[in-house]
Image (cartoon, rainbow, N blue to C red):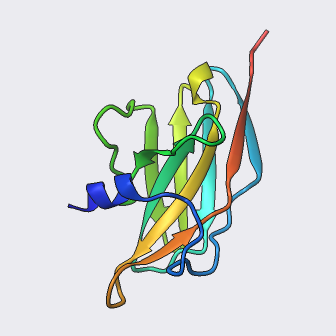
Amino acid sequence: MLENRWLGSSPLPSSLVQAALTQPASVSTTLGGTVQIACSGFSSSSYAGWYQQKVSGTGPVTVIYWDNRRPSGIPERFSGSKSGTTATLTITGVQAEDEAVYYCGGIDSSYNGDTEQWGNDTKTCHHQTT
């Protein structure tokens, strides 16, 4: 089951890593607002996943796999989409606990064996509305 593959993946360099995917270094939004993080460089045969890391040195949590599927326990405010070579993570109704580093990752299954691709990271910053 591919969900388990995503859940077991980690955004770390390996011999399977292809050219890095491109995502912004940071994004900002207001609490209760909507934020989108785009990640480009996917092949048309890749599936996109998104990973949340709240504290440096801890393992990432999968928030989206297979382009737009949420693992159980991930809130509905997290959604994913992919169009062409770009995948997008959307967080609607941002909450304080969503402030984290987010990584995009890809699995290209057009080859013999899966090929992994990884983005760098995007730091989310939230500002309270007055």
Residue 113 x, y percent position in the rendering: 33, 84
Question: What's the residue at 35%, 86% (across, down)?
Answer: 110
Residue depicted at 73% across the width and 55% down the height: 24
Name above or below for residue 20 compared with residue 93.
below
Q: Where is residue 61 in the image (x, y as percent from the top left)?
A: 46, 42
Q: Residue furthest front?
A: 57
Position of residue 95 in the picture relative to residue 76 (left or right): right
- Counting the numbered discs, the total is 0
The image quarter in which residue 111 lies: bottom left
Residue at 55% over, 74% down: 14
Quadrant in the picture for residue 17 = bottom right
Q: Is the residue 95 above or below the residue 48 in the image?
A: above
Q: Is residue 26 above or below residue 114?
A: above
User: Residue 10: x and y, percent?
Assistant: 49, 57
Kindly indicate the quadrant of the structure image that contains residue 13.
bottom right
- Frontmost residue, 94 versus 99: 99
Q: Residue furthest left?
A: 1
Q: With respect to residue 102, does 14 lie above or below?
A: below
- Please indicate whether residue 1 sits to the left or right of residue 6 in the image: left
